[in-house]
Amino acid sequence: MDETVENREKERSPEDLFDRIKSMLPSEAGFIKAEFEGPDIIIYLKNAKALYENEGIVRSIATSIKKKLVIRSEVSVLMPKAKAEEMIRSIVPPDAVINSVKFVEEFSEVYIEALKPGLVIGKGGSTLKAIAMGTNWTPKVLRMPTMESATLSRVRQLMFNEADFRKKFLVGVGKHINRTIAKSEWLKATALGGYREVGRSSLLLETPHTKIILDCGLSPEPAVKGMEANAGSDVNKAFPYLDSANLSINELDAVVLTHAHMDHIGFVPYLFKFGYEGPVYCTPPTRDLAALLLNDYIKLSQRAGGTPLYGEKDIRKMLTHMIVRDYGEVTNITDELKLTYHNAGHILGSATVHLHVGEGMYNIVHTGDLKYGFTRLYDPAVTKYPRIDSLFIESTYGGHGDVTKNRGDAERDMMETIKATVQRGGKVIIPLFAVGRAQELQMVLENYMMNKPEYKLDVPVYLDGMILEASAMHTAYPEYLKESLRNRILNNRSPFESEIFEIIKGEREEIFEKGPSVILASGGMMNGGASVEYFKRLADDARNTIVFVGFNSSNSLGRRIQNGVKEVPLPDENGKLHSVPVNLQVRTVEGFSGHSDRHQLVQFVENLRPRPKSIYTMHGEEQKCEDLARALGRAIHADARAPMNLDSIRLK
Ligand SMILES: [Zn+2]
């Protein structure tokens, strides 16, 4: 062992670190013990009140040791639960509408689920502080969605039920993160999927001591069995090349996710099925949306008579191994890697990933999917980072011709299309990704149909598939939304609950019998989902219109319809194929995408501060990745490339 390593170890052994913390605490706090719990350090005290009254101490210790500190009361001093609940209900004003109070002894925490969390928190945190001071439990606030979401309740319940496991798991992860390792000499990235293609996104990052995976998705086409005839897909291209990286699953230190779309998360439960037991990092909405989308994938596969790659059990296992972080929280995910999420503007909870490797050795920004432009839901992606050496950037619309129209024009175009269809007695199907585009469209329709006299069409707008659940999740995380929308939700004027929307739960027959309507149906690329069911019934009537607003991958059914196919084979309930004539109007309205167009991608890079020295394009068809790399290289005089799957790049 060389001298530097020895010094580092001396300085950084957990015992020394905990001793240092203890020495900085006032003696009346009654230090009991400290331990690692995931990326955080937990300090158990006999008298946590001493610190609640002087919060500056905790902040200064955290700054000095460069880690997040969590203060908890030792179990013996926690107020008995019934009494504590009584006190909480008397301290919190009734307008907060408390739904439930749950105690988790493993973490000395009490979870208060309320309709108005702001009132549980109080001005400057005063109500929370009163609860902590009065009961010794650490209060945590959960927002009740204004619309019911079964998935959200299930995920929250799972976390409570598994608290005992979670505690052990997090302590184990904490020890692993904080093991002291020698300084790394190199850093390597290997493209495992989603390079020069859209789908199965995955990147492996390696140092001599650390291996992490950034995203781990499925390709969209073959993901739903039974639809292969239309997808023209190759099952061999469905998964990331994990096997080729000579990677044993338990060597992985962490999986880091950017957002909840299937092409970024769809393969993660499979890792658990095959024995992965490490942490998965993501934002809180990504965890909950992942639960929704992964379970839906299982249902879709089964309905199509296929065998899903994994079961609900594997999804639950994944959920209990997730560690959630909000935007801006700097998190040590290994001894030499710090992760920070920032808003990516793409879907609820979507994030760009900033990774700081070693002590100042290297910095990576990975965009995941990115929107750098106006949407009604989210602020544009963040462009300011502490440092950037390499940028990995998506290229979905990175081709030089991929310039989408102005958003105002797109909205009017959409409304005119709907109006014309309604006037000739037809129905409009809009196939959508349930998460993201659906909510964007809901906001547009609500705005025009409620506020603009020329578009008060007086027809129902049906919501089918997972859209409702996904919209409900948006109401549980208003802090992830744009300010104007956040305020509407907080003031109980959520656009997702507008009177223009009618919810379809299973029974579709009525819609076909009734007159004109607008149908927002999940199944964006039409490789399965509600949109396909509507299409089957409405495709042969020339009065109807199908409007595409999102990305259709090159082999998708959506793309084939866009390209003007006159007949498509589609499976019935028994999986038997029938030919469906396509007579309805086919329209594509661009400008609603959750992805940046070419201009926005270039602008994003030009506005990045600081500017990266190297750029790698990903998540786009081959030509778009190459084209965008050339343009970005020229724009900021950086070394820009479009790696292929299986390429390894030495970054440092
Ligand atoms: Zn996405």
Image: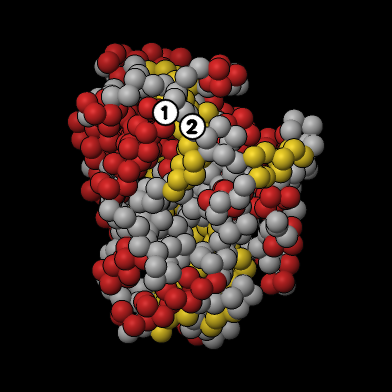
The residue wearing badge 1 is 424
Q: Residues within 10 Å of mark 1 (few under 14, many from 20)?
A: few
Q: Is residue 645 left or right of residue 48?
A: right
Residue 143: numbered disc: none
Q: Nearer the viewer, residue 55 or 321?
A: 321
Q: Is residue 16 above or below residue 316?
A: below
Q: Residues within 10 Å of mark 2 (few under 14, many from 20)?
A: many
Q: Counting residues from the N terminus, which is met first, the one under dot 1 or under dot 2? A: 1
Q: Position of residue 135 (x, y in %)?
A: 37, 24
User: In what element is the residue under mark 1?
Assistant: loop
Q: Position of residue 450 (x, y in %)?
A: 26, 25
Q: Name which residue type carries label 2.
A: Arg
Q: Is residue 69 left or right of residue 309?
A: left
Q: Can you see residue 493?
A: yes
Residue 543: numbered disc: 2
**Are the residues at dot 1 and dot 2 in contact (C-beta closer than 8 Å)?**
yes
Which residue is drawn at the image coordinates 69% and 72% (left, top)? 245
